[in-house]
Image (cartoon, rainbow, N blue to C red):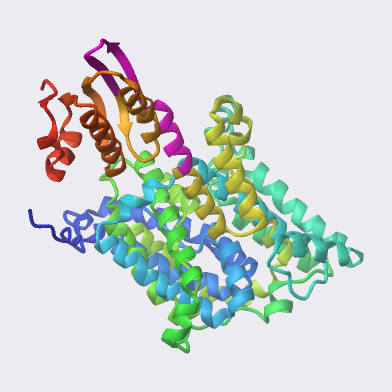
């Protein structure tokens, strides 16, 4: 039998098929949804960049360029790409340890890796990450995001926050005397407004009927559609400016946002640098793949249209992450909150994602100077709200309903993410998942002696005979060796569903023990996989008798 590489995935962006038969009705839906999600992305993109240790324009142009490429080349109809909260902790750590230039190289390298994952049809491998591991590191990242925002929320005068959680706590305590109550007031009002705004406009049916026919109805409906982060950003920035509050703003820390297109720049690239950045590259690629495909699966559940193509999506994410660093951007991935907003706003095709990018670009090029007045405490409030919504906190309360294995994986991944970093947490989670899976499968496997005479021994195997379960064959070997007379051993294998080479070696040892005693070994009811291995290794020819399972 000849073995070869699997066929490469074709490069077929969803936009190419979505535009066939495109109608004016769909265009209007996409323009409305794209404009809405573009406005929503404005404060988030700036907040994510600042929290990651980068200037706000890095997040904005990541959302613009990355969002455009993901929409134009991706494998979903409605996914929105851009900077994501999950990357804040990762990017901040890379910037602190390796510098911004090396972050750009690691992001571009991760883009190449993501593209290859999609090209070689490996997108399905991301689904092998257990849900307990995903929940654990997601909740851990949410805690770290919240912790990283306490400096700006409290207005503390800390020149540079450390990357480690203990270093951040120590810095917060050491600079507690610089606490600014005005910053806390703005941040608290922001968080309160983000929670209250959506509920404020959840008007009951009776009140709606009372509003019918009034001139204010259309205005109220238009106001209710305004995204809460935008409302908080505008109103609180105006409040801080009008009252001349002594708080730090984008302008005082970064000098504002350039009102121009980003320059194309090549980072100082060398293979030696790439070799040193293997860990950051793998971290960005792994998290980007998990986040983007998780977002695509969420979109599939909400959107009544064709399901996503994971390989095409990974290739698009790869292209976006390869291109964005040359314009000073940060890692790109699928963003669940903005994708859900896109769907609920009526998006029909990837055109909505393109409109989102163009809307954001227009706002940046026209209104960039106004961003200098945005208080950092308000952006901290936005990120605290993002962190709260990002975490699946109810899962901690539900842990008592799950197995000890599930609890161990979730809690350990959560704790290691906070104390160490995401890479170690995912590695630990996957190792635990493998070890606990082996243990579970080992517990399931049984080798029972179902009958015994002076001349024969009947054995029945259940489950998978693999490296983690071979010790359960030892009592059968011991029974054969302890017999005073030769034994004809018959193994009923109709419930043996899998056999690996270590399990085959255990059967070899059993055959040798039987042969030394002058007996024989027969196996009946073989399933296709164990039968294939016995035939390929020639072991089947040493059996006295064998049969296959009934079809």
Q: Tell me where residue 94 appears, x and y as whole percent.
A: 58, 72
Tell me if residue 136 is in the magenta stretch.
no
Q: Tell me where residue 106 appears, x and y as whole percent.
A: 47, 75
Q: Does any portion of residue 89 appear in the rendered image?
A: yes
Residue visible at 25% across and 45% down in the picture: 306
Residue visible at 58% across and 39% down in the picture: 408
Tell me if residue 442 is in the magenta stretch.
yes
- Determine whether 530 is above or below 297 in the image: above
Q: Is residue 406 left or right of residue 15?
A: right
Pick whichever, 282 or 66, lies toward us: 282
* Extent of the magenta region: 435-461
Q: Is residue 154 left or right of residue 401?
A: right
Q: Is residue 339 left or right of residue 142?
A: left
Q: Tell me where residue 328 appears, x and y as whole percent.
A: 50, 79
Residue visible at 46% across and 35% down in the picture: 439
Residue at far right of view: 177
Q: Is residue 142 left or right of residue 134?
A: right
């Amino acid at each position: 039998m000849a073995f070869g590489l699997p066929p490469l995935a074709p490069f077929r962006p969803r936009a190419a098929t979505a535009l066939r038969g495109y109608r004016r009705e769909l265009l209007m839906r996409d323009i409305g949804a794209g404009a809405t999600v573009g406005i929503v992305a404005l404060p988030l993109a700036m907040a994510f960049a600042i929290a990651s240790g980068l200037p706000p324009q890095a997040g904005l142009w990541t959302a613009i360029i990355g969002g455009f490429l993901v929409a134009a080349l991706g494998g979903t109809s409605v996914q929105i790409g851009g900077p994501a909260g999950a990357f804040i902790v990762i990017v901040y750590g890379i910037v602190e340890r390796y510098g911004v230039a090396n972050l750009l190289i690691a992001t571009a390298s991760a883009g190449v890796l993501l593209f290859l994952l999609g090209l070689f049809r490996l997108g399905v491998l991301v689904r092998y990450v257990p849900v307990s591991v995903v929940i654990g590191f997601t909740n851990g990242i949410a805690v770290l995001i919240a912790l990283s925002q306490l400096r700006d929320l409290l207005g503390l005068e800390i020149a540079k926050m450390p990357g480690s959680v203990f270093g951040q706590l120590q810095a917060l305590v050491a600079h507690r005397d610089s606490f600014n109550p005005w910053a806390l007031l703005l941040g608290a009002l922001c968080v309160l407004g983000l929670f209250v705004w959506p509920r404020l406009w959840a008007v009951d049916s009776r009140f709606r009927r009372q509003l019918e026919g009034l001139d204010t109805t259309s205005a109220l409906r238009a106001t209710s559609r305004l995204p809460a982060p935008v409302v908080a950003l505008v109103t609180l920035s105006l409040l801080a400016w009008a009252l001349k509050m002594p708080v730090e703003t984008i302008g005082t820390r970064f000098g504002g946002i350039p009102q121009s297109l980003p320059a194309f720049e090549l980072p100082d690239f060398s293979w030696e640098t790439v070799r040193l950045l293997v860990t950051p590259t793998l971290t960005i690629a792994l998290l980007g793949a998990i986040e983007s495909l998780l977002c695509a699966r969420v979109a599939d559940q909400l959107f009544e249209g064709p399901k996503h193509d994971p390989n095409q999506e990974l290739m698009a994410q790869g292209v976006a992450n390869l291109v964005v660093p040359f314009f000073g951007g940060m890692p790109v991935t699928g963003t669940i909150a903005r994708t859900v907003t896109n769907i609920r706003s009526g998006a029909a095709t990837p055109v909505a994602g393109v409109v989102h990018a163009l809307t954001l670009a227009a706002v940046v090029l026209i209104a960039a100077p106004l961003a200098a007045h945005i208080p950092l405490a308000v952006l901290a409030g936005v990120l605290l709200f993002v962190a709260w919504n990002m975490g699946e906190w109810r899962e901690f309360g539900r842990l008592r309903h799950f197995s000890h294995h599930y609890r161990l994986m979730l809690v350990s991944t959560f704790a290691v993410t906070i104390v160490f970093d995401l890479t170690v947490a995912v590695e630990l989670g996957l190792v635990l998942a493998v070890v606990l899976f082996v243990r579970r499968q080992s517990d399931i496997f049984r080798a029972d002696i179902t009958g015994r005479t002076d001349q024969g021994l009947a054995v029945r195997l259940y489950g998978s005979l693999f490296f983690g379960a071979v010790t359960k064959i030892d009592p059968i070997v011991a029974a054969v060796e302890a017999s005073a007379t030769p034994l004809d051993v018959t193994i009923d294998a109709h419930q043996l569903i899998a056999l690996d080479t270590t399990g085959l070696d255990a059967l070899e040892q059993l055959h040798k023990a039987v042969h030394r005693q002058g007996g024989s070994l027969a196996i009946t009811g073989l399933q296709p996989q164990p039968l294939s291995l016995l035939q390929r290794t020639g072991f089947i020819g040493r059996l006295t008798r064998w049969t296959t399972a009934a079809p």
